[in-house]
Image (spheres, grey):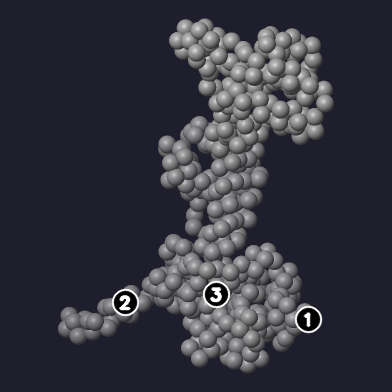
Amino acid sequence: MVNEFRLTSVVNSDTGLDVLELFQKDDEERMGTIRCRSKCPSCKKPFKYFRKLGYACPECKTMPSRFYIDLWHQKERFRLFSDKSGQVLDSYQRATTLLSHINYEIQHHTFDPSKYVSSEIRKFLFEEQIATFLKEKEIEETKGNISPSYISSLKNYIKNYYLPFFQGKDVRDVGAIDIKDFYLQLPQRKEKTIKNILDALNHFFKTLHKFGIIEKVPIFPVIRVPESVPYWTSIENQLKLLDVISDINKPIFTFILFQAVRPSEARALKWKDIDLENQIVIIRRTFSNSKLCERTKGRNVKKREIHPFVLKVLQNLPRGLPEAFVFPNPNTGKPYSKTRLEVLFMKARKTTGINLCMYAAGRHSVLSQAGTAGVSPFIIKSYAGHSSIKSSEKYVHIDVLAQRQIFERTVAKLAPEKIAKE
Ligand SMILES: [Zn+2]
């Protein structure tokens, strides 16, 4: 209660400031002083302290409108100009209320001076802005607009690369030199990884710029990485993989391998997503780690043709209620876990010697087979739900054979007589 007594003595003291300053010299753990920075706007003399009223200039009848708390805490001096919510101390009453609150916190060992940094400044700190950015991306992920793998990479970049370098920096002060220094201090990683780290950071700053938080986007170094060609395999090899998987687990692997969906989407499929009569499936749900995420909209939620081979398998499955999962794990009756699927698939990889992950053996292979067979990247984009045609083009540029259709569909068919005449 000693501190509260002292606070009362501050407010009631006629001489105010002087008494307090004496106090401060006595004791490291005193609870602080309310001060005002300004002088009387009329006579330019310092404001005087008055009991209960606070500060004023009695001659000009003026009062200050900005106060601050001057405080020593654990041998450090703090000047606090606002409360934790960022409210500036615009009246003496507000300052005394805050000071008594701080004293309460000091007494209960919960006082954290950084919480009193003006929220105006705090909201521009890199860590605050990147947290907001991540939160928004996570919302986009649940809507199906961003893949879960992007979110996990982003989290990794933030924790391991961005925060160690940018923490405590004001995003408005980050310029090309900071970005260059950031780039130069990055640990040795694959070129593609470095590019991804910088691209995501660049995207972050572009977003800040779009919302008017920063005036311009800092310049980023240009890193060129050759386009990665997705690993894929033939339909024969896909069938070999499926062949060595036990019958009870075949349905879900048939779906993953031939329907070109992500394994986490296959795990989350429900009967209500399937229309066997019209041979249509809608992918609108996924597992993110072990959490089921419904997509209400987004480019992934659309009708997709069911692969004829998959259709047969689905027709032979016992139909469940609309809310039932299509591919329950036969051992548990619940959806397969990510690990369970991977373990089963790893066995198939070892047995067949076809060393591809589920994603490559399924989704990448179906799309690559289509691209190689001359399917337009626009159709691939629409089916796969790619955000950019660039992703779809990767599947088309795989094989020169795909170029043959240019002649098959144009020259040969349109001008046979002309060719014959000449
Ligand atoms: Zn005055």
Residue drawn at point x = 52 percent, y = 77 percent: 282
Depth order, front residue of 383/22: 22
Q: Of tags 2 and 1, which is closer to the observer?
A: 1
Which residue position holds label 3? 283
Q: Is residue 3 left or right of residue 349?
A: right
Question: x and y percent of residue 61 in the render?
Answer: 50, 13
Question: x and y percent of residue 126 in the render?
Answer: 57, 38
Which residue position holds label 2? 407
Is the CB of the residue bearing disc 3 within 8 angstroms of ligand 1? no
Q: Is residue 418 above or below residue 360?
A: below
Kindly check if marks 2 and 3 are in contact, taking CB atoms under 8 A apart as contact: no
Of the image marks 1 and 3, the number of the one nearer the N terminus: 3
* Residue 389 appears in the picture as rendered: yes
Residue drawn at point x = 68 percent, y = 26 percent: 99
Q: Is residue 160 above or below residue 99?
A: below
Q: Quadrant of the C terminus?
A: bottom left
Q: Amino acid at mark 1?
A: Asn
Q: Secondary structure at mark 1?
A: loop
Which residue position holds label 1? 331
Depth order, front residue of 417/286: 286
Q: Is residue 399 left or right of residue 422?
A: right
Residue that lies at the very extreme toward the bottom in this rendered image:
316
Q: Amino acid at mark 3?
A: Ile
How many numbered dots are placed on residues in this image?
3
Is the CB of the residue bearing disc 2 within 8 angstroms of ligand 1? no
Q: Residues within 10 Å of mark 3 (few under 14, many from 20)?
A: many
Quote the CA–CA distance across marks 2 and 1. 53 Å
Q: Secondary structure at mark 3?
A: loop
Depth order, front residue of 77/243: 77
Q: Is residue 79 above or below residue 401?
A: above
